[in-house]
């Protein structure tokens, strides 16, 4: 599609992009949700995913700085609170560290990012740079993977609780909050994109931005699969359970 789309057609094209490219289709996630991973492999996922979680506020702060009006900044600022926390809520990053501790990782080691795979670091940093350097419209559009996250969260929580005896509901509490935060965030970003993508070129930029973000998420799972599933090439200095894990709570 190269002509100007209606708002409804643009939304449909965005949702088709997610259906084809979102990381719920990745073999690593299929293993994670079906109980096909060892505890070490789950730990590697949690540790590497933390690096992504920890950089989300950096990404959102870049967007806030570029939004031209106070009302939009106030709405987007809630994302910082959701991740960083405030006086009334610990925030998603703290809950992710609790997940890491619950499955046998040292939270201080996780926070250090010392064991993160090089490809994870590269992909996540590329996302932050994309949001910083591309247009505001593209930056907002790249967040639209949140349109698809509630379904994968529900599958993940049910699958992990069913298949891993080292996982508990409290361990996975991060995902409970995202079930209502992600749709709210996605609704605002989708409305913004549909309103501001007024040319065919801008609409193609929006679709490319979402595809880029899907690729960022996919690349992280490619790195995990290559290092910890097959062929099992763990880079020097990356996480090894025999060295860096601790007994689960």
Image: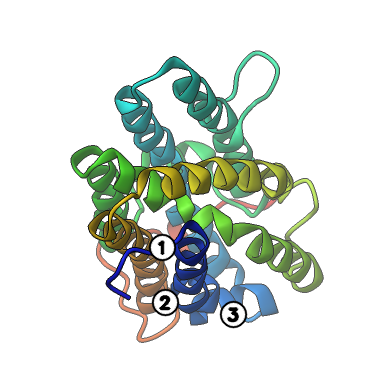
Q: Nearer the viewer, mark 3 or mark 1?
A: 1
Q: Position of residue 182 (x, y in %)?
A: 61, 46
Q: Is residue 101 visible?
A: no
**Numbered-mark total:** 3
The residue positioned 54% from the left and 53% from the top of the image is 146
Marks 2 and 1: in contact by CB < 8 Å? no
C-alpha span from label 3 to label 1: 16 Å
How many other residues sit within 10 Å of disc 3, few (<14), some (14-19) or many (≥20)?
some
Q: Position of residue 126 (x, y in %)?
A: 24, 52
User: Which one is in front, 188 or 123?
Assistant: 188
Q: Position of residue 191 (x, y in %)?
A: 52, 44
Q: Which residue is mark 3?
A: 31
Which of the marked residues, 3 or 1, is nearer the chain's N terminus? 3
Identify the element where label 3 is drawn.
helix
- Seen in the picture, residue 177 relative to 234 is either above or below; the reply is above
User: Which one is in front, 7 or 227?
Assistant: 7
Which of the marked residues, 3 or 2, is nearer the chain's N terminus? 3
Q: Nearer the viewer, mark 1 or mark 2?
A: 1
Q: Which residue is mark 2?
A: 225
Q: Is residue 25 left or right of residue 177?
A: left
- Seen in the picture, residue 74 relative to 38 is either above or below; the reply is above
- Seen in the picture, residue 43 relative to 195 is either above or below; the reply is below
Residue 217 circle label: 1
């Amino acid at each position: 599609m190269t002509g100007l789309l209606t708002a409804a057609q643009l939304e449909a094209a965005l949702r088709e992009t997610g259906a084809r490219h979102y990381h719920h289709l990745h073999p690593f996630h299929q293993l994670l949700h079906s109980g096909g991973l060892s505890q070490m492999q789950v730990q590697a996922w949690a540790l590497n995913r933390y690096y992504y979680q920890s950089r989300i506020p950096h990404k959102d702060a870049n967007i806030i700085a570029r939004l031209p009006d106070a009302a939009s900044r106030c709405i987007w600022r809630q994302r910082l609170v959701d991740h960083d926390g405030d006086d009334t809520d610990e925030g998603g990053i703290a809950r992710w560290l609790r997940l890491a501790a619950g499955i046998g990782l040292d939270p201080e080691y996780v926070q250090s990012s010392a064991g993160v795979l090089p490809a994870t670091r590269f992909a996540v940093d590329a996302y932050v740079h994309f949001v910083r350097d591309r247009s505001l419209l593209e930056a907002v559009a790249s967040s639209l993977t949140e349109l698809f996250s509630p379904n994968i969260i529900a599958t993940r929580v049910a699958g992990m609780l069913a298949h891993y005896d080292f996982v508990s509901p409290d361990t996975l509490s991060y995902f409970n909050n995202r079930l209502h935060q992600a749709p709210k965030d996605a609704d605002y970003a989708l409305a913004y994109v549909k309103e501001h993508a007024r040319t065919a070129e801008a609409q193609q930029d929006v679709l490319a931005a979402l595809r880029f973000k899907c690729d960022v998420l996919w690349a992280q799972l490619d790195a995990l699969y290559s290092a910890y599933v097959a062929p099992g090439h763990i880079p020097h200095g990356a996480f090894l359970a025999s060295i860096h894990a601790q007994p689960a709570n």
